[in-house]
Image: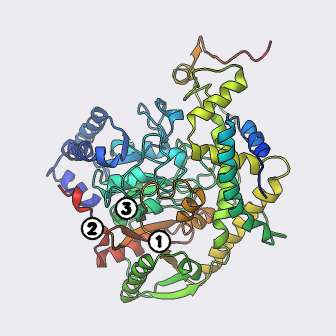
Amino acid sequence: MSLNLQDVQRVAKLARIAVSDDEAQAYQQQINGIFALVTAMQAVDTEGIAPMAHAQDVHQRLREDLVTEYNQRTVFQALAPQAADGLYFVPQVID
Amino acid sequence: MINYGLSRLSNMLASKQISSVELTQLFLERIQRYNPSTNAFITLNEAASLEAAAQADARLAVGDAAPLTGIPIAHKDIFCTEGWRTTCGSKMLENFIAPYDAHIITQCKQAGMVSLGKTNMDEFAMGSSNETSYFGAVSNPWDLVAVPGGSSGGSAVAVAARLAPAATGSDTGGSIRQPAALTGITGLKPTYGVVSRYGMIAFASSLDQAGPMAKSAEDCALLMNVLAGFDARDSTSLERQTEDYTRLLDQPLAGLKIGLPQEFFAAGLSDEVARSVEAALDEYRKLGAQTVEISLPNSSLSIPVYYVLAPAEASTNLSRFDGVRYGYRAPDYGDLDDMYEKTRAQGFGAEVKRRIMIGTYVLSHGYYDAYYLQAQKIRRLIAQDFTRAFTQCDVIMGPTTPETAFNRGEKTDDPVAMYLSDIYTIAVNLAGLPGMSIPCGLDHRNRPIGLQLIGNYFNEAHLLGVAHQFQQATDWHERMPDAFRG
């Protein structure tokens, strides 16, 4: 398995990371190096093996449906790159 | 005093031989003196540290002290710390002042411990040399041209150079144990779920685990009494009875069965590391332990599996950095997508972007089964290897790393070579087991060598005891770099 330049650019787009053509070439080489390492996995017979997501195979805890958080909008919005009047500012999305 | 263990410092505080303010000042002065050459700390706040020390002294004065009240500690900059800048080693969070405390920060505060500052780390904990930090590389105090390991490199150096009596770290693929080995200190990665992840900036959530880094196993045990515990705010935190992690420190080793995985002593291991590990095993035999050869046949797959699962989880965790709610935003952009793309291109470093892209790829349509699901299945095979091994032995031992600290720049152009530094540590994270590194020698360049100890699930107290007995019989853990003695 190896990625061509278009694959790298498609993945960068999916990941919302701008890459120049030069950067894409460097990433292509490095990522393919890592995938060469990953190829060793493909030969392993995993028929009938359940995927393991968590070491203890525990389940999500459920809790009472009660309000546990209080409003900290002012505190949190103070951290935003651009916010005012309780709103986060981003470029216009809908024309 | 810089070499004293936590219980000795605690006794001095209790008997008023020294105050927490004096102790804190001593370490803050050492940080001022040695941080320029090591770059171990990203953020200091002396006024806040001294204020916390004064509060600890007040607690000590009225007899309201917990065992570690007044003891200074350095925190890896991955832990959100209210009112302190918390960067995770990234430009993305260069100006992020955490609005709340991570669970373990709360635990340390409640115990009366004094924060000395936030330590340097690989960006978002992705790295094995502390060279990916936006705030610059960290130097190994044993040789300033050498890396300290990573990602908890700043915490490791803070302890190794005696800039802090103890530190916190986090370990996703070896990030506590590998830097502990490369700087000659003791570090413990607990069983997954024992220490809450709340407020620890997420890298790969099914693997991330916080733990203590200190000069000795005894100190790590005392710190575990503060750090461990159930926390409902971490959905994978385990509900277990409170335990005293110091309770087995004095248990003799007679009859202990040590498993030696043949795969950890094969090609790729440097002769010097092998010799020191063998010498440590001889010491264990003298102390009454037996060694048995075991096999972890799937351990060679741990790096491929890790470099699918960890980037996959990272790509989703790091999608939160979008330049909208907090963190960096690119100065110039067009539409919303352009803002995201430029913000993330400028805010993340090369290694982080590489891993996000790998993760995005393996989770993308058409590749999920072949990579992500296959990796999760092999993860189970790797965990089963350990379960089988623990029917033959009580503890597993081997080298922490294949070689001692390498020089800065030596592996930066070759990610795959860098990833191999974690070849003996990653399987432990995949299985969710507790693992430690303790110092067991120095190489011909005077760079430290680490012995790795792996225990069965929830056997931290036992593991700490096995490490402590070795440290009672040897003095590797007491060695410190000469240039930092003054």
Quarter placement of the C terminus of chain B: bottom left
- Farthest-out residue, front: A22
Q: What residue does disc 1 label?
A: B452
Q: Earlier in the sequence, mark 3 or mark 2?
A: 3
Q: Could you tell me which chain the residue with mark 2 belongs to? A: B
Q: Could you tell me which chain the residue with mark 3 belongs to? A: B
Amino acid carrying mark 3 in the image: Thr
Name the mark nearer the viewer: 3 or 2. 3
Q: Residue B298 lies in what quarter of the image? A: bottom right
Residue B212: x and y in percent read: 42, 56
Residue B108 relative to residue B232: left or right: left
Residue B358: x and y in percent read: 70, 49
Amino acid carrying mark 1 in the image: Gln
Identify the mark at residue B11; answer none if there is no mark: none
Identify the mark at residue B183; answer none if there is no mark: 3
Comparing B229 with A22, the one in front is: A22
Amino acid carrying mark 2 in the image: Glu
Q: Earlier in the sequence, mark 3 or mark 1?
A: 3
Tell me, yes or no, if residue B394 can be seen here.
yes
